[in-house]
Image (spheres, rainbow, N blue to C red):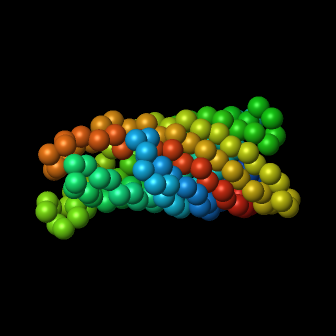
Amino acid sequence: MILACVSLALVSARAAHALQIVPSVGISQATDGGENRSMVALAIRNSFLPRTQLEIQAGYRSEKKDFSGQSFDLKTVPVTLSLWASPVPMLYAGGGVGAYFQGIEYDGNLYPASNETQYGVHLGGGLHFPLAPMAGLDLQGRYVMLGDKSTALASGKFDPSFWTLSAGVAIGF
């Protein structure tokens, strides 16, 4: 399905010359608190229908979780597909679905590391400020909803959902 959407985006981009590549950097935080962590991402956007854009994004984020005196690192690589509606030229909002490739590494190697894929949804929006005819500043916020995840620790489960705020440069072709 993602391959079909990528093909559709690239074919329509060739006709409309509306393809954008958006590298971005931002902050991310788990919904259960903790420290703000950095996140990096690279997105490809294309005009889909009037006032809408289809986006495919891949990113990277990590965070440290502490439970009952034990801790682990959670590393996430989100690969998402989003549909953004733009009611006015500088503002957009929407949501999408994604696969979230997650790895857990326990401190002190008490338990073997684990890797798992979770599927989730996200909602968000942003502002796009033109800087030049083919470039713009993109500010975005999104909230990612994922199901509870199990650990090898005695505390059992935690909520891996998170939010992000990012800034990027949208480069048009």
Front-lying residue, 38 or 94: 38
Asked where in the image residue 76 lies, by quadrant, the reply is bottom left
Quarter of the image for the N terminus: give it.
Answer: top left
Residue drawn at point x = 71 percent, y = 53 percent: 138
Residue drawn at point x = 65 percent, y = 39 percent: 125
Residue 46 visible: yes
Residue drawn at point x = 59 percent, y = 61 percent: 25
Where is residue 126 drawn, in percent x and y? 68, 43
Front-lying residue, 89 or 31: 31
- Say left or right for 61 vs 108: right
- Say left or right for 1 vs 153: right
Where is residue 98 drawn, in percent x and y? 44, 43
Quarter of the image for the C terminus: give it.
Answer: bottom right
Residue lying farthest to the right in this orientation: 133
Residue drawn at point x = 30 percent, y = 37 percent: 148
Residue lying farthest to the bottom in this orientation: 108
16 is higher (above) or lower (below) than 91: below
42 is higher (above) or lower (below) than 141: below
- Say left or right for 10 vs 143: right
Front-lying residue, 173 or 93: 93
Residue 5 visible: no
Where is residue 114 drawn, in percent x and y? 21, 57
Where is residue 129 drawn, in percent x and y? 80, 51
Image mark count: 0
